[in-house]
Amino acid sequence: MVWFALGTYYDASEKKSALVLDDDVYDLVEACRVLHPKGLENNAWIAGGTDGIMRDWNNVESEVQALAEAVAKWEDTEVLAPLADGKKKLAAPIQPERIFGAAANYVEHANEMGTVLATKAESNPYVFLKADSSTIGPGDTIYLPKQSKMVDWEIELAVIIGRQCHHVDAESALDYVAGYSVINDITARDLNVRTDYPFKFDWFQGKSFDTFAPLGPWIVPASCINDPQALSLVLSINDEVMQDSSTDEMIYTVREQIAYLSSILTLRPGDVLATGTPTGVGMARGIFLKPGDVITASIENIGTLNNPVAAQTHAYL
């Protein structure tokens, strides 16, 4: 089976769907037109962009797979060419309506944050929501809010739901996954806590600023990932490695997180699960993001997500 990914790129100001094979990025609609010149109207699934494809994944997965296999055979020919470097500005692969985040899902990270966890047998995942408006794509700027002095990084495996599910068990949970991506759960640590209310934590305030959820660089279908619990994660700030771990260190696996969430609500195609971060965040070191930093977040067999950091302005709104 050929490795491929689905993404979104900018053509001027217009967003278009991309098909990725190795390091080559193709316009998905153009690839479909070249390979099926008389049957484009029979491939209506391409019209909704990458968001539409992910939300209809249960019905179109086989067609997307067939297209990727066909494009792989046409590579290095003049019939179908990848996008030129100047037209490869990627956007977030999808615009999720809901981002579910898992807190303290790696033991070493919990330890570095001074978090005392109950045993797994006596507990459930701790999940919060990030605003959909916090999503940005590869190369987009993370803006540091003026009211925070402690903005931190958190590389995480992103899981994109591909089939609606409710009350699924852990054993079958991966059947509902469309694919995987990289997400950086940017967090204002000093705004994650409150002293003006009796409620100790404010996850919304600390995690939902605009630009606080870089996502990308694309989505790799679940069929291309043998085991989501065997992927290395590495995050660097200005080429200095801060986080270096593996998804096999998760307390609650991807399967278990899907089962837990689906016991509460109906998961929908296009939902994104940010599955927790390993040790190595800035809070434990007493260092935080500053203007001019560049964050590089990579997950094995998926890709690399780069984002610069700047002081908040109103120009990006």
Image: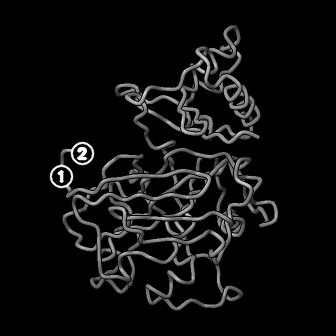
**Left or right: 119 with respect to 283?**
right
**Left or right: 241 with respect to 313?**
right
Image height check: is 47 above or below 191? Answer: above
Residue displayed at 77% across by 34% down = 62
Residue at disc 2, secondary structure: loop
Residue displayed at 55% across by 58% down = 299
- x, y (%) of residue 284? 38, 83
Q: Quadrant of the N terminus?
A: top right
Q: Quadrant of residue 246?
A: bottom right
Q: Which mark is residue 251?
A: none
Q: Which residue is mark 2?
A: 316
Depth order, front residue of 127/137: 137
Categorize mark 1 by other alpha carbons within 10 Å: few (<14), some (14-19), many (20+): few
- x, y (%) of residue 124? 64, 79
Q: Quadrant of the C terminus?
A: top left
Image height check: is 113 above or below 24? Answer: below
Q: Amino acid at mark 2?
A: Tyr
Q: Which residue is mark 1?
A: 313
- x, y (%) of residue 184? 44, 60
Q: Quadrant of residue 80?
A: top right
Q: Amino acid at mark 1?
A: Thr
Residue farthest toward the top in the current orientation of the protein: 38
Q: Are marks 1 and 2 in contact (CB under 8 Å)?
A: yes
Residue farthest toward the front in the current orientation of the protein: 76
Depth order, front residue of 139/96: 139
Residue at disc 1, secondary structure: loop
**Left or right: 218 with respect to 238?**
right
Residue displayed at 32% across by 62% down = 238
Residue displayed at 41% across by 46% down = 138
Work out how far the residue at label 1 is from the one at label 2, CA to CA, in angstroms.
Answer: 7 Å
